[in-house]
Image: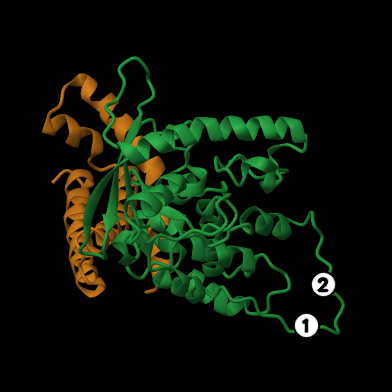
């Protein structure tokens, strides 16, 4: 899959928010025009939205004037609350959630940090699919009805915030701690960047633990023991790390009862990963190791 | 037996089954050209040791493969405990093995 972030400067990303906009260009005049245009477009709608949120959808245009947003409220035994908010020219799901929290219900809990697709904190289930809300444009959903829930396969804390503890615990249980005998006085290990192992690790190493793949995996849902795609993806990077001295521990967990042999290769993790990684491929690598280990071939 | 070993067994039995299934299906398609009767089938298969070996291997592979698949479905979808699923899978394996080998003997045995 294509890594959408390759060669990009995150600051130049159009996150659809007034704060991110000024970084768009270093041409001050252009920037000023763009910004005032943005304010004109949006403030007018904001004003209207604050006075009257029940504007009917105009039939003369494809774009709806408002969005119907169903938001999960409460914990595991919660319910959906419905909000009607104005549709905007450029609007991410995180913008929608923020608008609800700032203008409609200040008690709405949700998690976010960077707003520009770096930190992975804002992952939620949007219209049934786990995504980074800051990197999901409303228009990409092609629907004016949006359902937003916390990530699946994890307990719900409150509203849109899921408890990531089981996910992080499994990440640790997959033998995912790096171990080394080297000290700061040793020279850095010399790893050939073109070696097969280094390349295999490279394909998987950009994971930032957002939990989107874990929430998208059916096997995680069905089998409580399964470590999940992110944890096994991490184990795969360690297995291919020539400096890692805890190999036996990592292999025991990754090839063990909750490990790679549970994966059905459905590929949900791969299609859901916001940065285009393939835990499916990493797990396939572990499966191959597992078969070879049974034949007495050591990694 | 560890999950990894069961996983390996299921995949390896699938590898064994793949050419056997294809041969089996092609044989059926050719065999039914001249009508489908018990006499016709038995005339073709009885006393031929190659079919006895072929279907014995086939039955062994199925007896390993199918119960392991069922075991996973019982655990993941029907929330059986691993112990219970193991028991059900073992009974299925023995059943498939007994019925399958009996059928192989009947069809390829020496014209009884």
* Residue receiving disc 2: A189
**Marks 1 and 2 share the same chain:** yes
Q: Secondary structure at mark 1?
A: loop
Q: Earlier in the sequence, mark 1 or mark 2?
A: 1
Q: Nearer the viewer, residue B105 or A24?
A: A24
User: Would residue A207 be seen by someone viewing this image from the given angle?
Assistant: yes
Do the residues under discs 1 and 2 have CB atoms within 8 angstroms? yes
* Residue receiving disc 1: A182
Write the residue at 71% across / 54% down: A199
> Which chain comes out orange in the rendered image?
B
Say which quadrant the C terminus of chain A sits in: bottom right
Judge whether A227 appears above or below A195 on screen: below
| Number of on-image labels | 2
Give the crowd class for mark 1: few <14, some 14-19, many >=20 residues within 10 Å. few
Q: Secondary structure at mark 2?
A: loop
Q: Judge from the rendering whether residue A117 lies leftward or rightward of residue B95; answer left or right.
A: right
């Amino acid at each position: 899959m294509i890594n959408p972030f390759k060669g990009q400067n995150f600051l130049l990303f159009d996150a659809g928010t007034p704060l991110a906009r000024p970084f768009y260009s270093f041409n001050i005049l252009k920037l000023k025009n763009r910004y005032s245009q943005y304010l004109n477009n949006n403030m007018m709608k904001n004003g209207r939205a604050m006075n009257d949120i029940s504007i009917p959808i105009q039939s003369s245009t494809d774009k709806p004037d408002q969005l119907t947003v169903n938001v999960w409220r409460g914990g595991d035994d919660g319910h959906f609350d419905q909000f009607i908010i104005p549709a905007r020219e450029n609007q991410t799901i995180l913008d929608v959630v923020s608008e609800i929290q700032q203008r409609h219900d200040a008690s709405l809990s949700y998690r976010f940090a960077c707003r520009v697709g770096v930190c992975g904190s804002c992952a939620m289930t949007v219209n049934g699919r786990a995504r980074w809300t800051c990197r999901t444009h409303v228009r990409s959903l092609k629907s004016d009805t949006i359902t937003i829930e916390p990530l699946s396969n994890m307990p719900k804390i409150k509203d849109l915030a899921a408890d990531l503890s089981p996910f992080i615990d499994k990440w640790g249980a997959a033998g995912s701690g790096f171990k080394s005998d080297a000290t700061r006085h040793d020279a850095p290990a010399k790893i050939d960047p073109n070696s097969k192992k280094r390349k295999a690790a490279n394909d998987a190493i950009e994971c930032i633990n957002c939990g989107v793949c874990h929430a998208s995996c059916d096997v995680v849902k069905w089998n409580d023991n399964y470590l999940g795609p992110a944890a096994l993806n991490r184990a795969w990077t360690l297995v291919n790390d020539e400096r890692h001295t805890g190999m036996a521990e990592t292999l025991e967990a990754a090839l063990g009862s909750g490990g790679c042999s549970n994966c059905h290769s459905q590929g949900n993790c791969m299609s859901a990963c916001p940065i285009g990684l393939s835990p499916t491929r990493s797990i396939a690598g572990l499966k191959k190791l597992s078969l070879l280990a049974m034949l007495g071939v050591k990694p | 037996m560890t999950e990894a070993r069961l996983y390996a067994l299921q995949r390896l039995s699938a590898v064994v089954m793949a050419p056997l299934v294809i041969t089996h299906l092609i044989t059926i398609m050719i065999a039914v050209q001249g009508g489908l009767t018990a006499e016709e089938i038995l005339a073709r298969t009885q006393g031929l040791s190659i079919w006895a070996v072929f279907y014995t291997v086939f039955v062994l592979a199925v007896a390993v493969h199918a119960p392991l698949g069922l075991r996973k479905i019982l655990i993941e979808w029907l929330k059986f405990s691993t112990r219970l699923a193991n028991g059900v899978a073992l009974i299925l394996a023995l059943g498939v093995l007994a019925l399958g080998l009996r059928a192989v003997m009947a069809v390829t045995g020496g014209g009884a």
